Amino acid sequence: MPESFADSRLLQHHYAVVADVLFTLSADGQRLIAMNAAAEHLLGYTVRDFLKQPELWLSLVITADRQRLSDFRASMGRVERTTYRMRDRSGQMLLLEECLWSSGVGHPLCGRVTDITQRDKANEQEQQLARAYRLMMVRSRDPMAILLLKDESLVISHANPAWHLYHDAACAHSRLSLEHLYLPHVLRSLERAEPWQCDISLSLPRGESRLSVQMVSLGRSLADEGRQVAVMARDITQVHQRLEHVIDQQQRLARRVDETPGAHYATAGEWPPEELEYLSAGSEALTGLSHDLLMASPGLWQARLAPDELTICQQRFDEAVRERHSRLSLCYAFVHVDGRKRYLQDDMQLSYSPVGEVTAVLGKLSDVTQREAHRRQLDNLVQQMRGVVFQCRLSREGELRYTYLSPVASQVLGLDPQAVIDDPMLLLARIAGREREQLLMSLQTSARQQSPWEAEIRYQHPDGQERRLACVGLPQVIDSPEGGVIWNGYCDDATARYRIEDELRQSEERYRFILNSVSDLVSIEDSHGICQYISPSVEKLCGYRPQEIIGQEIKQLIHPDDMLRIAQEVHRAACLGEVFRVDFRIQHKAGHTLWFESISTPSMDPATGRYQRVLSVSRNIHERKLVEQRREHEAMTDAMTGAMTRASFLDTLDTLLSSSSREQMALILFDIDHFKRVNDTHGHAAGDQVLISLGEACRAQLRRDDCFARLGGEEFAVLLTDAGTATGVGMAERLRQQIAALEVRFKSLILRCTISMGVATPLPGETRDGYLHRADMALYSAKRSGRDRVVLASQSLSEDN
């Protein structure tokens, strides 16, 4: 072997043709001896640059790999390999693989440098793709796996649970191997070097499942065991079943089209058809002509139409084509084979090419003979209607035109219907300018919101009178390129109605003026007690605004203690249908109570015999009521002592004796000892002062519910409720002591007095007179025993007697 490889011609030839960088180093690895021209293509430096500057190569290696490469070359063994990064002359980073070998100790080193930058990037991309696919497998519910093709066999490298759930069961159930299911598809995917998609059927215990499978090559495995293929599957069993269901429905739909009444047809874009592309089986029953005959000779169809009607229909078709309408509906008379005239409705759907030519016409023929008869009846009805039936159209530019006016328009509007259709300004000019603008604005609002249109118009009739027109209409969007909205509506002369409403409004204003002017409170309540109306005077009288009362129960104004009495009176008067008068209290908003007198009139429903509402006129009688109560109080109260009068006391005693609580009651009768001596000695003025002081002392000692009365002269009575014998005796003793200690000042005198008292509790079945008699006997017993004492009445009638 020559001493230097540079001397070998064979090596020089190899240097020239190989793409890798070949070089020779000195035995110590520090000096460059030779290098081929590939270095210039790879790094941008000439061979001369590397030979003149031995350190240039290492200077291009990045700092992190430079020392490692130097040590690698210095400690070279037999054959070694390493990788490092370096930058070329343009600054681009390259990943290089260097292989060194030596023929022996002391011999030069031969080296080969290969650019593995792209290969490293490709490996990294494949690894990233594999990692991403494995991550996607974990998160996906669809069957996914990475298959490894090795020696014409498939091995599962990675698979998610869904893959095992499907394929383990399929392999166990049908005894098919992985190669049987996927190997042909994997080979096609690798052969085409692009994603491959196919469908695979798996036989599972629960039934047949269909998977949509996509395969993507992932390159060779890291361990170089074989080529990897990513398999992504999705269960499309239900999709496939739905697709089959849709196909089945389409077939059934086609059969039903043939079975439906009427006939369906298709042409290549002309009407009337010169050639039919399709005609359903229902045409024979509709026309009386056989299906095959019509397919062969469509002209037979036209021959059974009246010439003038055929011309009109053809004109409408041509107009629809010019305006690019997608739908068209025609109605014409057709002479059946049996000789009878029938009316056919021809509903067409038109398809256009980009240049505007009709490419197809799909039509449906329906027998509308009966409907046409009804339409004629409707026309007769429209002619008999008092108002005008109309159809108007508002274009996108805001132009209003009438397309139909019923014949009665000549009477209501005083204009010829056809003249208005030709020139709508004949009608619009008779509407005041401001109202005409409002009319157009309301139509635009109805079109925009697709809401019913209502308008009330003042119209100047040709006879010189002003008419009031009430119009209503329903909008419908026009399906055409030029667009717009049409209204089908009704217009009636409402002049008489407006006159009546105006009279009612004036009458209402008069009554409202009257109600607002009166000072009394006027109200209307329904049968449920809900206030329907209340006059404004309620704010001055009761402090409430009318809005606070109307719609609420009227009882919120009435004092709770008066509610039952008023309800009974309303019910009684309503049953008799008569006016009634009642006094009651109203709660003012400020919190105090006022007395009112109300005269109410119920309004009866003739059909049910029950009252519907009650009209009430109420007047404030609070001052009068206070005067009456004061007089009533004076009549029931002794003016001198403030005690109850004898008559009032006896009424109270009768009420208590007739109640269920009579056993819990005590009666005390007492009079002043030697009271006549006081009058005779000091005069009647002194006696009156004694009576006044005694009354004050008794009222101060008694409870609120106890009754204190003056029976006459110096004789008094006390009636204790919720009290037994012991309580009555105790109260009498306290009163006796209170009076005995009383000092009555009269002028310069101090007068004293004592009282004698008799106490009694009622016996079962005892009358008022008997009860008073026993208490009176106890009083006289106290006087006979020495006065200034309390005596309890006997509990036996025989003892009193």
Image (tube, grey):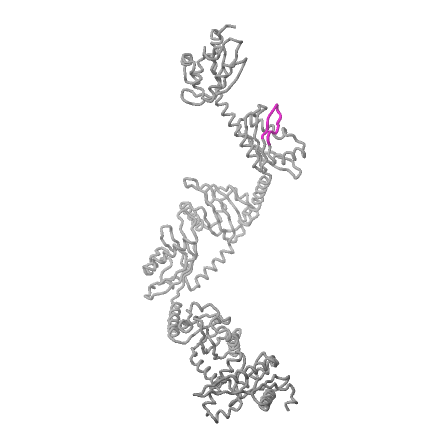
Q: Is residue 212 visible?
A: no
Q: Pick out the residue farthest to the top.
A: 2
Q: Position of residue 253 (x, y in %)?
A: 56, 45
Closer to the camera in the image, 210 or 465: 210
**From the image, which quarter does the C terminus lie in?**
bottom right
**Residue with the most extreme bottom position:** 680
Q: How many marks?
A: 0
Establish if 545 lies above or below 295.
Answer: below
| Depth order, front residue of 168/223 | 223
Q: Is residue 526 above or below residue 245?
A: below
Measuring from the top left, give residue 662's x and y in whole percent: 60, 81
Q: Position of residue 383 (x, y in %)?
A: 43, 62
Q: Residue at x 47, y 80 (%)?
A: 581
Residue 248 horizontal/vertical position (percent)? 59, 42
Establish if 423 lies above or below 26.
below
Q: Is residue 653 in view from this perspective?
A: yes
| Main SS of residues in magenta | strand
Residue 299 within the segment the image draws in magenta: no
- Left or right relative to 663: residue 513: left
Nearer-the-camera pick, 322 or 195: 195
Residues rendered magenta in the picture? 146-158
Q: Residue placed at 58% from the left, 39% from the top?
A: 240
Is 273 drawn above or below residue 406 in the view shown?
Answer: above
Judge by depth and name the residue closer to the eye, 255 or 36. 36
